[in-house]
């Protein structure tokens, strides 16, 4: 999926005459940069959308994307996250105290049950970490959950299947002017409103433990 947004960490480089070796290196760098533009999950299901607008291009202004930068230690106050699927809540803790709770989480087409295989539309259950953030996601902002772990891979391997991956906490599809998609619409990711994912982005650093339970 091609992302139309731009963050404040846009990669720029001037390249002179290329040798065969430097051309290969440049191709690898450009390929990696393109992968960062990929969003979490698959394309949204349009039939569930009520407020999708037209995504128009705007001139790049760094101040517009300041909120997409990695939070510093003072901003990132949360140290533990619990997702309760049954209650559809995400709670951020700081030293054992509740810092913030988000409600009305959206999941995939099969919200209950642990993710086992690629394409099963489920959200993982268990203990993971937030291991990467994507400021140029196709879903506004996204925080990756470290699924699959070694146990997830081993289970899927027994069945000759792929465990899948690229499970994120993210916002709504780029191009939505306000509100949120209706119902459960992701491919196993956890969706918040754009305002909520912006707040969560600032609250937790990479490496934060996340526990997902029923």
Image (spheres, rainbow, N blue to C red):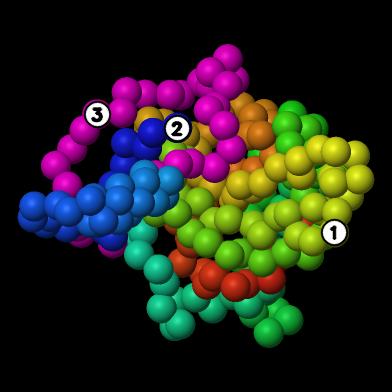
Residue at the far top in the pictured view: 47
Q: Can you say which quadrant of the picture contains the N terminus?
A: top left
Give the residue at mark 2: 1
Contact? badges 2 and 3 (CB < 8 Å): no
**Judging from the image, what secondary structure is the residue with disc 1 in?**
helix
**Residue at 49% over, 75% down:** 76
State which tag comes first along the sequence, 1 or 3. 3
Residue 52: horizontal and vertical position, in percent?
43, 24
Residue 193 highlighted magenta (yes or no): no
Magenta: main secondary structure: loop
Q: Can residue 95 be seen here?
A: yes
Find residue 83 and report its image quarter: bottom right
Contact? badges 1 and 2 (CB < 8 Å): no
The residue carrying pointer 3 sits among few (fewer than 14), some (14 to 19) or many (20 or more) residues within 10 Å by Cα, namely few
Residue range in magenta is 37-66
- Say the numbered circle drawn on residue 56: 3
The residue carrying pointer 1 sits among few (fewer than 14), some (14 to 19) or many (20 or more) residues within 10 Å by Cα, namely few
Q: Is residue 182 left or right of residue 118?
A: left
Give the residue at mark 1: 151
Q: Nearer the viewer, residue 33 or 91?
A: 33
**Residue at 58% over, 15% down:** 47
**Residue at 85% over, 38% down:** 160
Number of dots carrying numbers:
3
Residue 65 highlighted magenta (yes or no): yes
Q: Nearer the viewer, residue 137 or 100?
A: 137
Q: Can residue 99 be seen here?
A: no
């Amino acid at each position: 999926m091609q992302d139309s947004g731009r963050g404040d960490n846009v990669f720029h480089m001037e390249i002179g005459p290329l040798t065969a070796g430097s051309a290969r290196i440049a191709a690898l760098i450009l390929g990696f940069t393109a992968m960062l533009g990929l969003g979490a999950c698959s394309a949204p299901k349009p039939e569930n959308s009520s407020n999708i607008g037209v995504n128009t291009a705007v001139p790049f202004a760094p101040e517009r994307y300041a909120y997409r930068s990695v939070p510093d230690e003072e901003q990132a106050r949360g140290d533990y996250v619990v997702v309760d699927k049954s209650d559809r809540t995400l709670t951020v803790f700081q030293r054992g105290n509740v810092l913030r709770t988000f409600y009305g989480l959206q999941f995939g087409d099969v919200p209950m049950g642990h993710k086992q295989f690629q394409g099963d539309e489920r959200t993982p259950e268990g203990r993971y970490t937030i291991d990467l953030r994507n400021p140029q996601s196709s879903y506004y902002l996204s925080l990756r959950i470290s699924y699959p772990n070694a146990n997830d891979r081993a289970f899927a391997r027994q069945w000759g299947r792929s465990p899948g991956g690229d499970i994120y906490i993210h916002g709504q599809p780029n191009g939505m002017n306000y509100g949120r998609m209706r119902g459960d619409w992701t491919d196993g990711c956890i969706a918040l409103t754009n305002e909520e994912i912006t707040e969560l982005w600032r609250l937790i650093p990479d490496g934060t433990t996340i526990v997902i339970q029923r």
